[in-house]
Image (tube, helix red, strand yellow):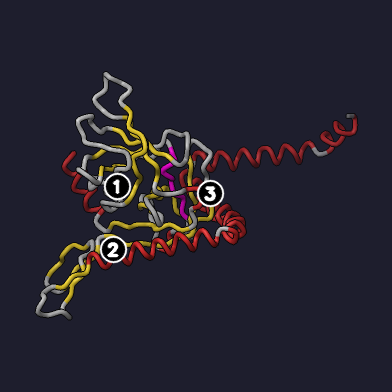
Amino acid sequence: MKNIFLFIRRFFTFFMFLIFQVLSISFLVNYNKTYEAAYSNTAHAVTGDIQKKYNNIQYFFDLKSTNKHLAAENAALRSALSAYVRNADSLHLNNIYTLIDTTSVDTAGTVRKYHYYMAKVVSNSLSNENNYITIEKGAKQGIQKDMAVAGPNGIVGHVVAVSDNYSLVMSLLNHKSRVSGMLKKGFMPGLVEWDGKDPRFLTFSNIPKRTKLAKGDTVVTSNYSDNYPEGLMIGRVVTISQEDPSSNYYQIKLLAATDFRTLQYVYVIKNDFSKEQKEIETKAQK
């Protein structure tokens, strides 16, 4: 014990210098927006590199499952393509057109509303109250804050922070996450959240008891979302509760379409018209 005190006494000045240095850096980061942004970007880059190396090892053992999901997604895309490509005229079989999510510009062509960026997941938390996902794409690859994120089977979350080569995604498994969903059958809108319990299930609220509803019904993104395209899969109804007689709304549990435990790749979705929509809505509110 005496040697410990002698050691501390000998290097007391050095230890005090370290303590004050840490405090100074902490004050700079917490109370100066410029330093806070620089620290945040650096931290995301460093942790992203570490998590990438760890994830590469895990990814090797999940190749079989990943390939299975990719094959299923390719099959779904081919089915969707065949459903949307039709003959324009039965007399001109070579003259075909494709229906896609586009907005007309003029007679010369169209402009696509949504753009998709594929990104690899390098970190994914499941056991916290507020879970986040780190993806290996950032500002240099065109990713911006508030962009929607979807997986092979359904929506995942939205981007909340961006560094040069990495982005932080707020998962649906987060108490701060709110997504506008609707019943695919009947188009009744509601709110999709997570109750913080089982990562396989979500809650779907604000659905009146007069609504025709059954187990197995599909819930998709609604047209009220300014970042998600309408109609993306969210989940399927597994339980419908009417326990509260004083409430006019169902208590609904959904089985999430996305399996967050095996998520390896995602699609970041950019809405080219999101800024314009927000501007006109803000102007109307003023």
Residue denoted by label 3: 39
**Above or below, 54 relative to 211:** below
The residue at the point 43 percent across, 45 percent down is 170
Residue 220, which numbered label? 1
Decide: few, some or many residues near mark 1? Use Cα within 10 Å; few <14, some 14-19, many ≥20: many
Q: Main secondary structure of the magenta part?
A: strand
Residue 274's x, y, as percent?
26, 53
User: At which x and y percent is residue 81?
Assistant: 28, 67
Residue type indicated by callout 1: Val
Q: Is residue 29 left or right of residue 189?
A: right
Secondary structure type for disc 3: helix
**Outermost residue toward the right in this view:** 2
Q: Is residue 61 left or right of residue 168?
A: right
Task: Find numbered disc 2 in the image and state the secondary structure of the residue it sits on.
Answer: helix
Q: Residue at x 32, y 32 (%)?
A: 240
**Between marks 1 and 2, how big is the CA–CA gap?**
16 Å
Q: Quadrant of the N terminus?
A: top right
**In this rendering, the label closer to the viewer, 3 or 1:** 1
How busy is the neighbourhood of tag 2: few (under 14 within 10 Å), some, or many (20 plus)?
A: few
* Magenta stretch: includes residue 114: no
Q: Earlier in the sequence, mark 3 or mark 1?
A: 3
Q: Please give the name of the residue rendered at 49% of the width and 63% of the height, measured from the top-left corner.
A: 67
Q: Between residues 158 and 144, which one lies in front from this camera angle? A: 158
Give how far apart the Cα atoms at labels 3 and 1 are. Answer: 38 Å
Q: Which residue is mark 2?
A: 80
Q: Which residues are magenta?
A: 167-174
Q: Residues within 10 Å of mark 3 (few under 14, many from 20)?
A: some
Of discs 2 and 3, which sits in the foreground? 2
Residue 138, position as x, y percentages in the image: 45, 59
